[in-house]
Image: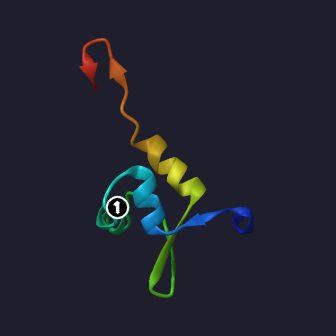
Amino acid sequence: MIIEQNFLTPEQVARFLQVHVLTVYSYIRMGKMDAVRLGRRYRISTQDLENFVRRNRTRIGPTGLK
């Protein structure tokens, strides 16, 4: 249920991912990261952040990065 989800600010997500906050806004604008817009501000659910990380995971094969 959506009411039970926790939401993070783009700044919190940027700290977690260790990227610049403008990178997070870019991911949102490009549709790479789901977010909820409340007025003029964005919020990212922890579930959407987990999905983003899962979709962007890099696997290392026997010959290096794939």
Mark 1 — residue? 27
User: Is 14 on the left or on the right of 30, as rendered?
Assistant: right
* Residue at horizontal 37 percent and vertical 62 percent from the top: 31
What secondary structure is found at the residue carrying circle 1? helix
Residue at 50% across, 88% down: 39
Residue type, label 1? Tyr
Question: x, y (%) of residue 48?
Answer: 54, 56
Q: Is residue 38 above or below residue 64?
A: below
Q: Note whether 53 is above or below 1 in the view shown.
A: above
Q: Label 1 crowding class (10 Å Cα cut-off): few <14, some 14-19, many 20+?
A: some
Identified at 38% across, 66% down, the residue is 28
Can residue 33 be seen from the camera position used here?
no
Q: Position of residue 15 (x, y in %)?
A: 42, 57
Please name the residue shown 65% across and 63% down the image: 6
Q: Is residue 16 visible?
A: yes
Seen as rendered, the residue at the extreme top is 62
Q: Quadrant of the C terminus?
A: top left
Above or below for 44 versus 64: below
Front-lying residue, 33 or 22: 22
